[in-house]
């Protein structure tokens, strides 16, 4: 377990190449790892649980990772499938 991130619902982990160049960003949302996005301007990953869009905006000497949560009625709830006994 990563104790630095213990109890965090949303988290981002930046992956570097040996040369120091940023390769990708791993996204955790709703307490679950939802995937990885390439380090390119405009790339995004949507959370299948809450619908939040996590996007990257690269500027000349820095970048932003922005979580944009939709309005509550924009997404449908996710339910586990029930199986007959």
Image (cartoon, rainbow, N blue to C red):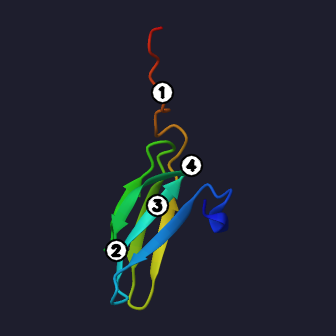
> At which x and y percent is residue 76?
46, 33
Q: Nearer the viewer, residue 41 or 2?
A: 2
Question: What kind of element bears circle 1?
Answer: loop
Chain-order first, disc 3 or disc 2: 3
* Left or right of residue 53, residue 43 in this image: left
Residue occupying the point 40% across, 70% down: 56
Task: Name the image quarter holding residue 39.
Answer: bottom left
Residue occupying the point 48% across, 32% down: 78
Residue at the disc numbered 4: 30
Residues at discs 4 and 3 in contact (Cβ within 8 Å) = no
Mark 1 to mark 4: distance in Å? 16 Å
State whether residue 80 is above or below residue 24: above
* Left or right of residue 66, residue 5 in this image: right
Question: What kind of element bears circle 3?
Answer: strand
State whether residue 14 is above or below residue 26: below
Mark 4 to mark 3: distance in Å? 10 Å
Q: Which quadrant would the N terminus be assigned to in this image?
A: bottom right
Q: Which numbered circle lies on residue 27?
A: 3
Chain-order first, disc 1 or disc 3: 3
Residue occupying the point 51% across, 44% down: 50
Mark 2 to mark 1: distance in Å? 32 Å
Count every numbered label the image shows and give the total.
4
Mark 1 to mark 3: distance in Å? 22 Å
Residues at discs 1 and 4 in contact (Cβ within 8 Å) = no
> At which x and y percent is residue 64?
47, 76
Residue at the disc numbered 2: 39
Decide: few, some or many residues near mark 1? Use Cα within 10 Å; few <14, some 14-19, many ≥20.
Answer: few
> At which x and y percent is residue 41?
32, 74
Mark 3 to mark 2: distance in Å? 12 Å
Residues at discs 3 and 2 in contact (Cβ within 8 Å) = no
* Left or right of residue 69, residue 25 in this image: left
Q: Which numbered circle lies on residue 80?
A: 1
């Amino acid at each position: 377990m990563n104790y630095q991130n213990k109890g965090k619902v949303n988290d981002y982990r930046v992956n570097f190449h040996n040369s120091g160049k940023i390769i990708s960003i791993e996204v955790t949302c709703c307490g679950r790892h939802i995937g990885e996005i390439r380090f390119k301007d405009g790339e995004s990953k949507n959370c299948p649980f809450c619908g939040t869009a996590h996007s990257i905006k690269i500027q000349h000497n820095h970048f932003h990772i922005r979580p944009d949560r939709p309005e509550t009625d924009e997404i449908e709830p996710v339910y586990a499938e029930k199986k007959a006994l």
